[in-house]
Image (cartoon, grey):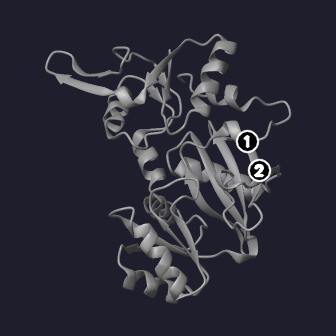
Amino acid sequence: MIGIVRNPYSTSAPSRLVEAAAELGIPIRVIDLPTLSVEVNVNDGAIVRDAVGVVDIVSLAPYLLSGYATAVYAVRVLSQRAYVQNPVESVLMADDKAATAVRLSHFSFPQVPSMICPLDLRHVLSAAEKIQYPVVMKRTHGANGRWVRRADNPTSLTEGFHELESRGPGALIVQPQVTEFYGRSIRAVITGQRLLAAELRVAAAGEWRSNMAHGATQHHIDLTTTEAALATDAALAMGLNHAGIDILRTTRGPVILEVNSYPDFTKMLAQPGKDLTKAVLLACLPH
């Protein structure tokens, strides 16, 4: 039985996975993330429960942990007796942009240069001066470009810093703006160590972020052999069997912008001859 997690912060992917399971005749257990709890006792060890009851599964589909700390402990328990496509530690690392950058650097992956700074304006200004404007500043956690700001000078950087600072404690990442691929990014979805789909995302008019949440459009794109290998190898290095790798094209070759442990494949354009949801679901079956 495959476990499919429902998270209020991401509803389309779990719903489509449930539909695909019905179409394929695969038994599932829908897990209500906000109600997860863990019971630990001497006789039975650790048991995971949700609003329905004990969660007893043999495999867990890709999931989103954001917003629910208890879910981290619950997935750790489930992974002791079930196949978890994306290990919880890999998910936590991918959700942390700074941790991702450090991990990729360990394997010498080409990526957008990053300076990880304390939440201190002096440090951030110094980093931007070293990198040279324009720069991009982002919190280490966040999705859909929500906590990302672009700055052309110290004044706009200071304004953006205070906006990000207002979200609470944390660290900031400062990166150079990749102007040669301005307003564009490539999203590659990797599942089961193979490339499922790739798309070019183009920012909406007047917007520089190429996130779908900010109105970007998407188009099919064929990756080069180098780009496909980069995406597949990055997912493997992060320990993710399902991942979205964001790539930028530069004069020195492709570089990784970000890694996502839960890319929303339902927003990808239909691939000729492919059902992305079914492919993701079938990859969840225990090996």
Find disc 1 in the rendering and name its residue: 268
Secondary structure of the residue carrying tag 2 is strand
Where residue 236 appears, as percent x and y from the top left, is 56, 47
The image position of residue 196, as x and y in percent, is 72, 39
Q: Residues within 10 Å of mark 2 (few under 14, many from 20)?
A: many
Closest to the observer: 246 or 105?
Answer: 246
For residue 141, above or below residue 177: above
In the rendered view, does 230 fall on the left or right side of 5?
right
Q: Residue at x 35, y 64 (%)?
A: 170
Above or below, 269 against 283 in this view is below
On the rendered image, what quadrant is the C terminus found in?
Answer: top right
Q: Is residue 230 above or below residue 151?
A: above
**Is the Cβ of the residue at disc 2 closer than 8 Å to that at disc 1?**
yes
Residue 250 visible in the shown view: no
How packed mark 1 is, by other alpha carbons closer than 10 Å (few <14, some 14-19, many 20 or more), is: some
Residue under pointer 2 = 199
At horizontal 78% and vertical 51% (from top left) the residue drawn is 218
